[in-house]
Image (cartoon, helix red, strand yellow):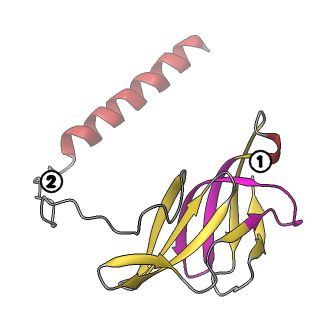
Amino acid sequence: MSQFRRTTVSAVVVAVSLSLVSAPAHAATAWPGGPAVTVADGSNVFGTNLSGLSFESPDVLWAVKNGPSTLYRLVRDGTRWKPDAVGGRTLNYHDGTGDPDAEGVVRTPDGLLVATERDGDDSGTSLLKVLRYNPNSTAKSVNAVAEWI
């Protein structure tokens, strides 16, 4: 049995080594933007803990913050971004409870996916989840329409 394990591990090492050797090299490319830093929002609009941004279109970005868990739909306002007319939306788990510690957001054709690391109502316990929200909701408090552990 131990000989089989060594053979299997050796075969895996050889396969990985070959894939690295045969992988095509990619040329480095320059950052497409300029070197200048530009402030994209007004002073103290989001407070602290803005954790993630996702691009929807040239005029819409989505952002999440934690503590308290809040979702923002940001719209272009000239050269800056501001929350839409609804403002911050409080995020809840599917059952309407909790304070998801939102760390990332991505806009997909199926909705907004938010990655969490714990429930802020019980911050000492890890609770890794992916929550899906309806991007068309205009409610000030939104429940996840689906959640995965």
- Read off the magenta span: 91-117
Q: Nearer the viewer, mark 2 or mark 1?
A: 1
Asked whether the residues under the numbered discs 2 and 1 touch, taking CB atoms below 8 Å apart as contact, a structural biologist would say no
For residue 40, above or below residue 67: below
Drawn side of residue 47 relative to residue 67, left or right = left
Q: Which residue is mark 2?
A: 26
Quadrant housing the N terminus = top right
Taking depth in this image into account, of 140 and 32 the one nearest to the observer is 140
Taking depth in this image into account, of 20 and 113 the one nearest to the observer is 113
- Badge 2 or badge 1: first in the primary sequence: 2
Taking depth in this image into account, of 134 and 15 the one nearest to the observer is 134
Which corner quadrant of the image does residue 2 belong to? top right
Residue appearing at x 57%, y 62% in the figure: 64
In percent of width and height, residue 31 lies at: 15, 60
Q: Extreme front residue here?
A: 43
Residue appearing at x 34%, y 35% in the figure: 16
In percent of width and height, residue 15 lies at: 35, 36
* Residue 110 located within the stretch drawn in magenta: yes
Q: Amino acid at mark 2?
A: His
Label of residue 31 in the image? none
Drawn side of residue 15 relative to residue 26, left or right = right
Q: Amino acid at mark 1?
A: Asp
Residue appearing at x 75%, y 82% in the figure: 139
Q: Which residue is mark 1?
A: 119
For residue 120, above or below residue 10: below
Element type at mark 1: strand
